[in-house]
Image: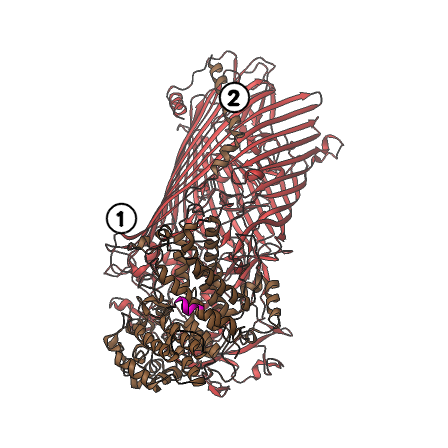
Chain colours: A red, B brown
Amino acid sequence: MRKIAIMSVLLLLMGVQVVFAQRSVTGTVISSADNLPLPGVSVVVRGTTTGTTTGVDGKYAIQVPNNQAVLIFSFVGFATQEITVGDQSTLNVTLTESITQMEEVVVTALGIKRQTKALSYSAAEVRGDDVQKVPEINLMNTLQGKIAGVDINIAGTGAAGSSRVTIRGNTSISRDNNPLYVVDGVPITRASSSYGGRDLGDALTTINPNDIETMSILKGAAATALYGSRASNGVILITTKSGTGQRGLGISYNGSFGFENLVDPYRNRQTLYGNSGMNGDNSDTYPSTWNQEVHRQWGPKYDGRDLGINFNDNPDIPMTFGFRENHWKEFMRTGSTITNDISFTGGGQNQRFRASISDMRYVSPVPNSTMNRQTASISINSKFGKKITLEARANYSTSKSKNRPYPSRYIQMLSLIPNSWDITWLKGDTDKWGAKPDGWMLPFSTNDYYQNPYWSAYQDSQNDERDRITANANLRYDITDWLFLNGRIGTEKGVLKVTNIDAYGFLRGNVAGTGAVTEYTTNENQLNAEYSLNVNKAFGSFNIIAMFGGSSTRSAYNRDGIRGDQLLIPFYHVITNAGQLYTDVSNSKSGINSLYGSAEASYKDLVYLTVTGRNDWFSTLAPENNSIFYPSVGISYLLHNQISLPEWWSFAKLRASYAEVGGGSSAYATKIGYNFDATGYMNTPLVSLPNGIANPNLLPYETSEWEVGADFRFFQNRIGIDYAYYSKKTTNDIVGVTLPQSSGYTSATVNLGAIANKGHELMLTLIPVTGKVNLEFNLAYSYNMGEILDLGGVSEVSAGSVGIGGGIDVKQIVGERPYAMFGYTQKKIDGKPVWERWTFNYAGQAHQSWRPARDPQKTLLGYGTHPNSASLTTTLKWKGLSVSAVIDGKWGATVAFEAEQEMVERGMATSTLPGRDGSLFLEGVYNSGTSSEPVWSDVSTAPGYTINANPANNLPNPVTVAGNEIPYHVKHFENYYREGFTKRVCQMVVFDADYAKFRQVTIGYNIPKNIYKNLPVQNLNVSVVGRNLFDIINHLPNGDPATGGATGINNRALPSTRSFTLNINANF
Amino acid sequence: MKSNIFYRFLLAVLILIGGYACDTDNLIDLDDPKYMLTPDNADMSMLFTNILISHGRGSTGGNPARLEGGYCKYYATYSNLMLFGGLYQFDQGLNDNPWGVYTGALKMSIALEDFLVKKDDPNQVNNLAMTRIMKVAVIQRLTDFYGDVPITEAGQAYISNNMKPGYDRQADIYKYMLQTLDQALTSFSTDATVVSLTWKGNADPKKARDIVYNGNIDKWKKYGYSLMLRIAMRASDADAAMAKTYAEKAIAGGVITNNADNWTLQTKDGMNSEKSPYSSFFEGSPSGDPERYMKLGEYFVDFLKAKADPRRKVIFGGRLNNTITAVTASNMQTYWRDESKWDWDLSQAKGMVHGTNANPSPTLAAYHWTYTSPNPFLFTMDQPLSILTASEMNYLIAEAALNSWTTGTTATAAYEAAITASMNFMSSFSGLLPTQKIESSEITDYIAANPLGTGDAAKQRLAEEMWVSMYMNPTEAWSNVRRMNLNLPSNSATAQMPTRYAYPENERSNNLDKLNAAITAQGWSTSMTREEEISKKLWWDKN
């Protein structure tokens, strides 16, 4: 590595002097769309390995042997051109954009570049430009909705949180379904981590988008088969930029300046009623102490009166009884992202380099939360003589995050604070936010489990530092012009250091409020080495491209942690101040050895047949069964080259493929580990047994998939249709089976599950106007339907539950779609809702109210994953101006929204208003008979059928139950909503999760050169990007269905934000 | 020249990688966890400690007070918290709780026994015997809750891959327990090497292993024979011959007759997992509902008052001073152990009426003024949990003597020793106020006023005394109430005191076939309701 660094410095200082033995050709490559220089265009002398790429100014220089030499100009997204040099020494070329021109080359598995037309499966490629201008810290979030079959969920844990990507449905029932990420040919560890309710992000947050050249999304098994056991969930290949063949030094600057604001999630918050003086009591009682039952907004109507009490008994803060601005807006702030990135490229024909550094400063809309990231990368391409090519890259990323958001706590606490308060009161009157003068937390309720949100944001803290280095070197030796050897070594090292402070002074946080400090460091190391022998040879009308190779991957994970609590010196939050220490250490190592090969045989330009195979040997499996083979076969047929199609039908390709891949074997899953509790019971250490049984016979699960597709172009590619149908089945899925406790254990992990996914993917392109004005529509639609086929002999397994609406369970059920959601619903007789009386105790008195009668069994409410998703991108270009807009949406899922429960339970939702101003008249029936012989009567005929809010209204007569006269409670509607609807039935907290959003608008302008012709700037582009502009469809009263996961349960995701970013790009 | 170097370098790299890819030994070596505790490197004596703690704390988190405490009429309240015991209602969660020993103390005993048996080390015989005694202790409590339960096939999922264990009949389980105890007790060795390897207690708490008896084999034997006596006497109505054989064997072998040998587990005012499960239950939580405090039951209070039982001083707490009107959860936490906040007049003690779900006093404060609480100082954190004590054994000896079985003593002598042991033990708790200590003269006076009597009256007297004495162990008290037919008035106009726990939901979800076979084998219907199920009688409950 050091040699490379020294070499690059030398190159940088001296420029590159290369002795030219042959004739030189120079020129500029520009784009037909905007007449701007195109950097990164590949320029190759046909029939040789001589090649270069254009610089940031679009210029190139290349040596040609003679006048008959043909130069091939190719670039992703553009039509390839071949031009005979002749006697010209300057050759300027204009490339035309194509939807997917068939001479286009894409990066496929193991970094092999292949012609798109030869592919027997659907593959999508995204250019670096598309992800660079969008101010997302997590790279994957920029691709949301853009690629058919790729489902990206915003995690709801803040902008720097982990990505959640599912390609072609959930391949496994219980495993992480995220794809494999491969950067410059080296698989990286995506592992996301979290601690103490905060999402610490994943490796994708460490990548500088400006370093990305292309991203290839390999969706199906045939595309990913060469990754074998890691390929079940699809693969995302990221290729970073490399040096270009420009002479001298090219400098490129990218700057972006964005701000971000909360999208108020509480569109349906009631503004009429405040908190009462007593729990569930008379609505006319005003609060008489400042912290009385603050979290229940079931009190009298706001009238602005002076309550005669002061917040925290502070005479400077008198409390009045009126609705104030909503707390989220006051608590949150305007966030910002500032990124500066500069890159240098240079070199000559044989030696090229690129170096970049970037700095990103992110200020979260969540108070006191920030993230800074710096990256540096260097890339070198060198040719030594005619036969040896070296490519080497190193990327370093370091980030420091302060107080990543703690969404569940903010959501709960902010919904507990009455709306008649100004939330800034909770900052306290000292320099220490959220604290009283004695340093302890300023509580806002008599319930001391509730944490002051300012305390959460400013006193409890969690800081982390993440460093990641990836480096790889690729050496190629051309044995002949049709045979070469390739060797590659890549390494990744990621270090994450976390310090978590549960601040001293919050009574309920831990033992007697004496605080706790946790520090831990995780180390992730990967080493990947591979080699291959490659053949590319024509035999008459046949051409063979073949590869045989092998690889070895080693991964190691190490965690060293220590936690200390019972701090001895108050408010001194260092681990050495802890009265009691606990260690937390673990490690794991694993490895895979592989051999693989692939062969593509083509006949003329008509049929391409590809066969691949890979064998993996695992360290994590028992030696007897640690070898698994993964094959694939595919065919691509170019119809238009065989039969004559109408003239308007420009292109027709049919494709089909089949492959088997695998996934999911983790270290030590085959070993039983005892639990050790060093603190134990009264300081006596203890050992206990785990409740899960280790399974020595565990295997990675297997996925087989076939895919067919068609790619048609009409009217010179003005209309394009790319369609794919796939059907895949996972067998031997790893499923957790529940055991009876009497067996001594509660779960075992077995290879018995099966799940199927079938789907359609459609990409439509329409270019109605082209020329000076270019208008383009791109539609991506995908449909995926999953079905659980087998769960190891049981009919269902749990996939989560949440205690709202009386308890909602999400299950995987044989014969159903994944993530089936069940909950209690109100019973109906002849379509009429059924009500029942119930008795509750309050202050020692029994009272009666009404509540919905529920069906005894939970019913199927819907499914957590959306089968349909679509996005429409409209792009308009005119001269240097381009405008594009993205609308995306998903439909077909249901969500249980936990934050809504808080709203209803606390009386904050507008849905809790009916009844407050008088009586709530029930509609439906009740049982006026006995439980064994029910008589369903109209509820309006029942004694006391109204739910009375106001004692001034007529109270119904007391009801005699079992000899006791029981009065109807004067404040029924709190119990009616709170007990009845949030604890009995789910209809107020479960919603249709369909949505459509105006996701993004981008306006870009290439400032004409004549404006800055005296400056040393070659081109200058500015753009403005707006993200998450508004909802077109959203059925949630108080939230965003697009954030917070895809399993049907939204556990208090952070509200979404809207952002605007200005980007400046200048090349020198 | 240059390319030559690179060519060689490339070749070297390829050879290296090629060699690596075929090296499977290297792969196997990777799969060797560094920090994972496996059966090979775990210190099994720490597993034994865990069995003692799990059994001592009952795996039930204070619930004996909520169900059995209500069944036995020790406690009453109108709050939801204890209605199930107070009203004889069925509650799924409480009912399922004792089944947890299958993944706790029972699993650990089975795994530890399996480990020691496979190790086949003659020097470990004492540790194996102690493990087996604990296994029987765990099984006895379990089967006395549920009756027929899986035993021979239980806890085997990892050992023998049996994931759906079948059920054993309770009669067989009783035989199995007695035989296992007999075998374990005769296997104890006094060989110096064996004794030196017996898991001991240790002055250093970080190394303490046998935290109950400090590795004292004599005490373990006494405990083993005491369990044998308890089990034999419990079977005395169902299988008198077996009961006689083993009761006589146990008494001859030497049971616990002295409080110094009691099987107790110390608790500590520390983390919730270390506090007395009763104390954290009675004192409530600072954010809970203030009405949730349990009171002593009316019948129990009146019974002790009528007998002028000196244990009133220990068992009765006070009534809240009626000058205190602010009754909130956090207030109650501070009042709970503040002697001055309570009225301690024993003559004014009043128990809470059973079987109501409404506050019989008009207000919350009046509830606390009116009814007598459990004595908070009896449930201070540092009290030992009483799992098997000398008084229980002395009562059982007295009962065996009444059966004319060979006991080496008389029924009256054992009865008096039992009362003395009970009062001395309760009185010995360090947290009690000085005024709450029982004087020896009070014990003699009480015995004189309450003689054993003869015949059925004597049996009734024994049943009553055991009921009062086992106030600190409601689970075993309930078993005695059931077996001895102590005539406690019902808490409910419509329901009788439950006589067993219903089988848990977990079995219904995951082991239904075996469970249904067991239900059918007992002559019950698989479609009976839970309420019907908890009114069925166990094998030993003949009367």
- Which numbered mark, 2 or 1, is in the foreground of this view? 1
Query: From where the camera sits, is residue A978 visible?
Result: no
Q: Is residue B354 above or below residue B284?
A: below
For mark 1, name the chain: A
Residue A92 is drawn in which quadrant?
top right
Does A503 lie within the magenta span?
A: no
Q: Nearer the viewer, residue B478 or A1024?
A: B478
Prevailing SS of the magenta stretch: helix
Q: Is mark 1 on a helix, strand or loop?
A: helix
What residue type is disc 1 on? Thr
For label 2, count other residues whose C-alpha is less than 10 Å away and answer few (under 14), some (14-19) or many (20+): some
Instruction: Residue under label 1, please give it.
Output: A576
Residue B5, given in percent of the width and then of the height, sits at 47, 16
Residue drawn at (61%, 20%) of the image = A482
Instruction: Residue under label 2, please give it.
Output: A27
For mark 2, name the chain: A
Residue A1011, given in percent of the width and then of the height, sits at 43, 32
What residue type is disc 2 on? Gly
For label 1, count other residues whose C-alpha is less than 10 Å away and answer few (under 14), some (14-19) or many (20+): some
Residue drawn at (53%, 58%) of the image = A743
Residue B151, given in percent of the width and then of the height, sits at 53, 62
Split into 4 quadrants, where in the image is the N terminus of chain A?
Answer: top left
Q: Which of A713 and B456 is in front in this view?
A: B456
Magenta span of residues: B249-254
Query: From where the camera sits, is residue B312 visible?
Result: yes
